[in-house]
Amino acid sequence: MSFLCDVTGAKPGFGNAVSHSHRRTRRRWNPNIQRRRFRLTDGSTIRLNVSTKGLKVIDRDGIDAVVARIRARGLPRLGLAAAGSQDSRPRPQEVH
């Protein structure tokens, strides 16, 4: 599972772990990602990778408003491409 929130865009942060002797080693802080299913008002369901902060955003704004923002941003992985946009994969050119 990817450590990327579909709602907030939260991704891992990087930095140093500092020991008692001040030796620094690289480490990474992963967001708390939950895989959740949500039911929209039209009856369809959607599955999102959501951070716990993203869950609070959904509680505050409602799932329909959040999905509308995701669609405006375009998330083809979820089948939520922006309105009027085409698939982002390059099409093979026809040879005559």
Image: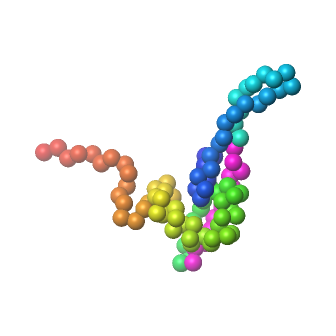
- Up/down of 34 relative to 62, above or below: above
Q: Residue furthest right?
A: 20
Query: Residue 12 versus residue 41: which sits nearer the camera?
Result: 12
- Up/down of 10 relative to 14, above or below: below
Q: Position of residue 38 (x, y in %)?
A: 62, 68
Query: Residue 66 versus residue 88: which sits nearer the camera?
Result: 66
In the rendered image, is residue 80 in sight?
no
Query: Residue 84 versus residue 37: which sits nearer the camera?
Result: 84
Q: Quadrant of residue 21?
A: top right
In the rendered image, is residue 66 in sight?
yes
Query: Is 53 in the magenta?
Result: no
Q: Position of residue 23 (x, y in %)?
A: 78, 22
Quadrant where the C terminus is found in the figure: top left
- Left or right: 58 with respect to 76? right
- Up/down of 5 relative to 66, above or below: above
Q: Quadrant of residue 95?
A: top left
Q: Residue furthest left?
A: 96
- Left or right: 9 with respect to 27? left
Q: Position of residue 32 (x, y in %)?
A: 71, 50
Query: Residue 14 versus residue 74: which sits nearer the camera?
Result: 14
Q: Position of residue 3 (x, y in %)?
A: 63, 46
Q: Looking at the image, which residue is at 42% across and 62% down?
A: 82
- Left or right: 90 with respect to 61? left
Q: Looking at the image, which residue is at 46% across and 63% down?
A: 72
Q: How is the image coloured?
A: rainbow
Query: Is 31 in the magenta?
Result: yes
Q: Residue furthest front?
A: 22
Q: Looking at the image, which residue is at 52% across and 64% down?
A: 69
The number of numbered discs placed on residues in the rendered structure image is: 0
Q: Which residues are magenta?
A: 30-41
